């Protein structure tokens, strides 16, 4: 019995020594572990688990999401506004140009200025 216990202890000690030599888990492996853990917590099995794992693994991890730069935020806001106004073609291009430059946002095409009457 003592020999069995000693052999078991030596095996566990050797196993933990080898485990330290392994590489750290890649981001994909970490994601897989997280998805597996979540599926296990929800007690999912069969097709439900398969569908959950597929969607979980295809989603981008939260830590890779970056905040938008001010220019990207401006672009996003201008795109949203142009979409709400259903702008297309040259009108949209003109709107986007003005919006991104921070100019007054043109809503319609402006008419050219009339030349002033000169006294003769």
Image (cartoon, rainbow, N blue to C red):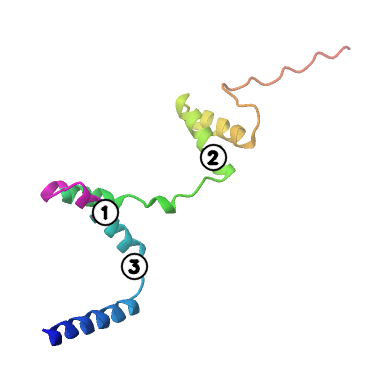
Read off the magenta span: 37-48
Q: Which residue is labeled 1 in the image?
A: 35
Mark 2–mark 1 distance (CA, rounded to whole Å): 31 Å
Badge 1 or badge 3: first in the primary sequence: 3
State which quadrant residue 11 falls in.
Answer: bottom left
For label 3, the SS is loop
Badge 3 or badge 2: first in the primary sequence: 3
Q: Residue at x 12, y 50 (%)?
A: 45
Quarter of the N terminus within the rendering: bottom left
* For residue 119, side relative to residue 11 (left or right): right
Q: Position of residue 55 (x, y in %)?
A: 25, 48
Q: Residue at x 84, y 14 (%)?
A: 118
Mark 3–mark 2 distance (CA, rounded to whole Å): 34 Å
Q: Are marks 1 and 3 in contact (CB under 8 Å)?
A: no
Q: Which residue is labeled 3 in the image?
A: 25
Mark 1–mark 3 distance (CA, rounded to whole Å): 14 Å
Badge 2 or badge 1: first in the primary sequence: 1
Q: Which residue is labeled 2 in the image?
A: 73
* 101 in magenta: no
Disc number at residue 92? none
Q: Position of residue 87 (x, y in %)?
A: 48, 27
């Amino acid at each position: 019995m003592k020999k069995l216990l000693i052999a078991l202890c030596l095996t566990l000690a050797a196993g933990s020594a080898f485990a330290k030599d392994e590489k750290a888990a890649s981001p994909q492996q970490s994601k897989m572990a997280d998805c597996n853990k979540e599926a296990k917590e929800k007690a999912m099995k069969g097709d439900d688990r398969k569908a959950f794992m597929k969607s979980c693994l295809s989603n981008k991890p939260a830590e890779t999401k970056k905040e938008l730069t001010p220019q990207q935020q401006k672009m996003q806001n201008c795109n949203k506004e142009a979409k709400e106004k259903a702008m297309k073609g040259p009108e949209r291009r003109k709107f986007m140009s003005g919006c991104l430059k921070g100019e007054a946002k043109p809503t319609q095409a402006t008419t050219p200025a009339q030349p002033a009457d000169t006294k003769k």
